[in-house]
Amino acid sequence: MSMQHDKNNTNNIYIGMMSGTSLDGVDGVMVSLPDPDNEAGAGMQVLSSAYIPFDAELRQQVMRLQQVSENELHHEALLANALVKIYASCVKKLQALAEVQVVHAIGVHGQTIRHRPELGYTRQTNNPSLLAELTGIDVIADFRSRDVAAGGQGAPLVPAFHRAVFGRAGASSVVVNIGGISNISVLAADGSTRGFDTGPGNVLMDAWMQQHQGKTYDANGDWAAQGNVIPALLTSLMDEAYLQLSPPKSTGRDLFHPAWLQSKLLGFAAVRPVDVQATLCEFTALTLANEIVSHASDASHVYVCGGGAYNHQLMQRLQALLSLQSCNALVNSTAILGIAPEQVEALAFAWLAQRFCLRLPGNLADVTGAAGGRILGALYPA
């Protein structure tokens, strides 16, 4: 998936950055993208990648804004500025690592704090004007709003990128992104693409881990692996109306949050915390397996990206649950295809920035439910 890169040709160099629902930090990539008339996967070259973690205070600021609170506008503006300083640091790190200073544009998602497409809005806090000022590079941001304005969910936006990079004619596969929330892209053998949010990814496991182990995530799923699934609790978790909806659909921390989990734990006071963690891991794996079997039973491969790809227990449970439902798909991370799992979403937003600059649609109406293809994003010139 690489090609020789000409450092004198800057028109194809983009930076993509993503800070997702896991609230762990910013993933960034600098990438040389091919002409969109070519297959993206055949000509894409990652020039550098970087990760900058969020500190506990910033994570807390984001969490506070995901619920109704006092003086929200003021707190959001301060958070946006703090985020952009991290984004700018990531850009400078990417430039230094790649030894490339001139970049055509930055595609930056911002940090989702509210996602209510059923009410006609989605909110990603960001200050792209400040980012353009700090970096001297054109910034493309606010990718989701245009799709929502066209009647879509505004999410997921990555399936179009997954099709461009991972799709293969005559082969059916699924790309699974496990961040805070999980989503799947069904890349059908006939060339069609579907995708939607399946439900929680790491969001509930991370919150439970923080509460009971004082850690931000369950490394390798080791703690979950020590517990036993609680069948009655799993049934209660699966009894969520969102899981029964047909796509297009999208969700986030607006639904799946610690208070939602606590409501499901009523009546389970005697359970061990480690068993709850095992059940939450099973919940994520089961919701994914059920949707893969329902929408892509003929898939030969499931490629996993996002932080969840490094949760060995979750990956093993996903493979086992697919096998139990007579699905023969093999589960691997996207690393097997030459792209590190943590780079995929950042690459997607670099790709979406290129689509904007070329005035090409970035969404798939069949995925989001929008009235049609739309050019996504807004330009903040350097």
Image: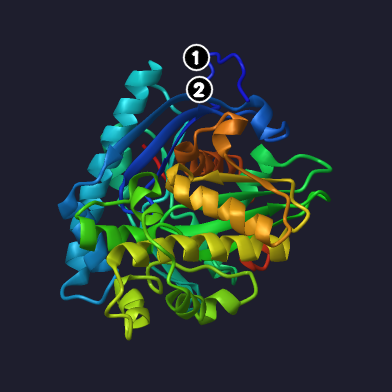
Residue kind at label 1, given as amino acid type:
Lys
Depth check, front residue: 276 or 31: 276
Mark 2 Cα-neighbour bin, 10 Å: few <14, some 14–19, many ≥20: some
Depth check, front residue: 162 or 105: 162
Question: Looking at the rendering, in which quadrant would you find the C terminus?
Answer: top left
The relative height of residue 181 versus residue 272 in the rendered view (above or below) is above
The relative height of residue 379 versus residue 369 in the rendered view (above or below) is above
Depth check, front residue: 229 or 54: 229
Residue at 25% x, 54% y is 80
Residue 48 occupies which quadrant of the picture? top left
Q: Which residue, given by chain and number where applicable, does mark 2 sit on?
A: 10
* Left or right placement of residue 272 versus residue 47 in this view: left
Depth check, front residue: 232 or 175: 232
Q: Distance between the residues labelled 1 and 2?
A: 7 Å
The label number, if any, that marks residue 7 in the structure image: 1
Q: Report if the CB atoms under discs 1 and 2 are less than 8 Å apart.
A: yes
Residue kind at label 2, given as amino acid type:
Thr
| Dot 2: element | loop
Residue at 63% x, 69% y is 248
Residue at 69% x, 62% y is 325
Residue 39, given in percent of the width and then of the height, sits at 71, 33
| Dot 1: element | loop
Mark 1 Cα-neighbour bin, 10 Å: few <14, some 14–19, many ≥20: some
Residue 275, given in percent of the width and then of the height, sits at 36, 65
Examine the rendering and report whether any part of residue 286 can be seen.
yes
Residue 287, given in percent of the width and then of the height, sits at 55, 66
* Left or right placement of residue 54 versus residue 281 in this view: left
Residue 277, given in percent of the width and then of the height, sits at 36, 62
The label number, if any, that marks residue 293 in the structure image: none
